[in-house]
Amino acid sequence: MGYDRSAVRAVIEAARVSGRNALSPDECRAICAACAIPLPGTATVASAAEAGRAADALGFPVVMKIVSPDILHKTEAGGVILNVRSAAEAEQAYEKIVAGARAYKPGAKVAGVEIQQMLSGGQEVIVGATADPSFGKVVAFGLGGVLVEVLKDITFRLAPASRDDALSMIGGIAAAEILDGVRGSAPVDKGALAAIIETVSVLAADFPEIAEIDLNPVLARPHGAVALDVRVLLDFAPPVERYRPSREEILRAMNRIMRPAAIAVIGASAEDGKIGNSVMKNLINGGFEGKIYPIHPKLAEVMGRKAYRSVKEVAGEIDVAVFAIPAPLVAGALKECGEKKIPGAVLIPSGFAETGNVELQNEIVKIGREYNVRLMGPNIYGFYYLPRKLCATFCTPYDVLGKAALSSQSGGVGMAIVGFSRSTRMGVSAIVGLGNKSDLDEDDLLTFFEQDDDTQVIAMHVEDLKDGRSFAEVAKRVSRKKPVIVLKAGRTALGARAARSHTAALAGNDRIYEDVLRQSGVVRARALNDMLEFARCLPIMAAPKGENVLIITGAGGSGVLLSDACVDNGLKLMEMPPDLDAALRKFIPPFGAAGNPVDITGGEPPTTYRNTLRLGLEERRIHALILGYWHTIITPPLVFAKLVIEVVEELRAKGIDKPIVASLVGDVEVEDACRMLFEHGIPAYPYTTEKPVMVLGAKYQWARAAGLVGI
């Protein structure tokens, strides 16, 4: 996007020299002119007489607004008067606005009154940008004027945003239909609106000093769009440069940490109940086939293995050191790891920033940077990497190998991952604790798991993102290949920073997370169990090739609930074509229903389920199937499960593989049937119609973002 950068720079430098963090209306107009953002005719006056003359020259009606660096919310101060229709009214309005401003905030500096052509015939929207603590510059769009504060119908994207991003924002708010024209009104010019969104995003991204931009309202009209009010806030404090190793550097370190040939356990112990003892037991009993070096200042051996007083005494190379010593001793031992050129340190000890000891954490980070040692933690349970039979943790061992990699900031969530995985027999490739994330974070894990052939899906419990922009960039790349699932804790955004503009006030932390994660192709889980079920199911489900979903059910009530769940999860129920309707009716009783859902009724034998399921899988116009089963003595639960498995596997052998999920209601036997279905790659849940549809919806969300639907 081309614009006059030098003109914008001149305005910002003038504000810097004069020590101002807010641009004047004239300066805001200069920036808009440099960026070709349309504005109405405007003049700024310093007296009532000037107001009358300027209003007359602009043409009536006009809007008049207070100009004061000390009054940011003009309406609250009575600083806006609409529909001024004569020079005399303009003079009176000037006096009223200035008097009202002085009464609202005595001592406020009043630079004058802005007079602006009053335009009509469009929809008020807001376009803005703000600096988010995690994601950096983001651009916002939503309904404008008073509605933005009441409805908070707004969406965000990382800045700079592309034209496609801008158009998706326009179509992404809840009130998008209003912009298409309702009750006879004309649709707005979305191209003009998208151009303004893109321009604002580029402007904010190009100039670090721009902290916030508000164009509120922008009048979106059938032909063009005009910014009626513009506010720009600056921040001249230089942003803290975040540490970002290259992808090659990350992989070089992560491959040695996750796939080590040799591990040192600093604080290894022969005493039961000690963390260093548990780590040693897990490494040995877990079957790790590499070298294990116990490090202890006094012991000659630990668990039958020679012990060393320091990692520097070990003759061979060490890939990663697991720390099981008190926090005050970590810095010294870490320096020795650096001198030994060990690329990774797994810091189990607590007592760092999570307890307020930020200084000690900063010290170990400094040592890690100096010696190029990547730090996992501190304050973590360690990690598991099952392809190498590696349990570098003091927690319970785990050995069910699979294709899901999971991480958590919380140790409690990490143990929930282990327990769920064990109870459901969900195989995992890795479980990683990140804790305080002094160094290694989700970006590094994504970069590693992206190229890890033993991982097909990545699920992450996140309390915060140290560098949200870096995460979004990496996740966008990885999610095109493998599903990335995120459970973001803290959705209520308590403690959000106080905001000085509409855009920043509406940029509640979770609102930005929601939109940026979606922009990055991430599947967001709303609860811990949801994250775990997504990790369990997405790797075993085929990717859908189209949007048409068919429900086949033996219970009409379940069919209704399954239909509701489809709406809730963004799934499209296929409209039944007449020929397919006729084909299905050959298999179901006359009192059944061959619409969608297909209700075969509860009294049907196994052949009815078999025939309708086979038809649904073979029919190319159907892209996904939801099965609703009702427990009957004619088709018992295990009989149902076996016939579904037989049909699905028969057609998979012929190259036909579609996503299929099942909801089973009935007595406790349905639990065994669900387990059997899961063992054969068919997600199935007892006593719920919501959960199977939810996991299918997650698969669709990922497949759409990855561009797989409709190919």
Image (cartoon, rainbow, N blue to C red):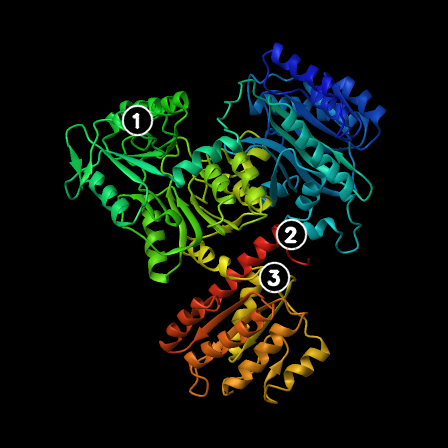
Q: Is residue 78 left or right of residue 284?
A: right
Q: Which mark is residue 322?
A: none
Q: Nearer the viewer, residue 514 or 394?
A: 394
Q: Residue furthest front?
A: 315
Q: Give the SS element for disc 3.
A: loop
Q: Residues within 10 Å of mark 3 (few under 14, many from 20)?
A: many
Q: Are marks 2 and 1 in contact (CB under 8 Å)?
A: no
Q: CA distance from mark 2 to mark 3?
A: 11 Å
Identify the residue under disc 1.
357
Q: Looking at numbered disc 1 in the image, what kind of residue is underneath it?
A: Asn
Identify the residue under disc 2.
707
Quadrant in which the N terminus appears = top right
Q: Is residue 365 visible?
A: yes
Q: Where on the picture, by quarter, is residue 305?
A: top left
Q: Which mark is residue 544?
A: 3
Query: In the rendering, at what x and y percent does residue 294 appear?
Result: 23, 35
Query: In the rendering, at what x and y percent does residue 251 appear?
Result: 48, 35
Q: Give the SS element for disc 1.
A: loop
Q: CA distance from mark 2 to mark 1?
A: 46 Å
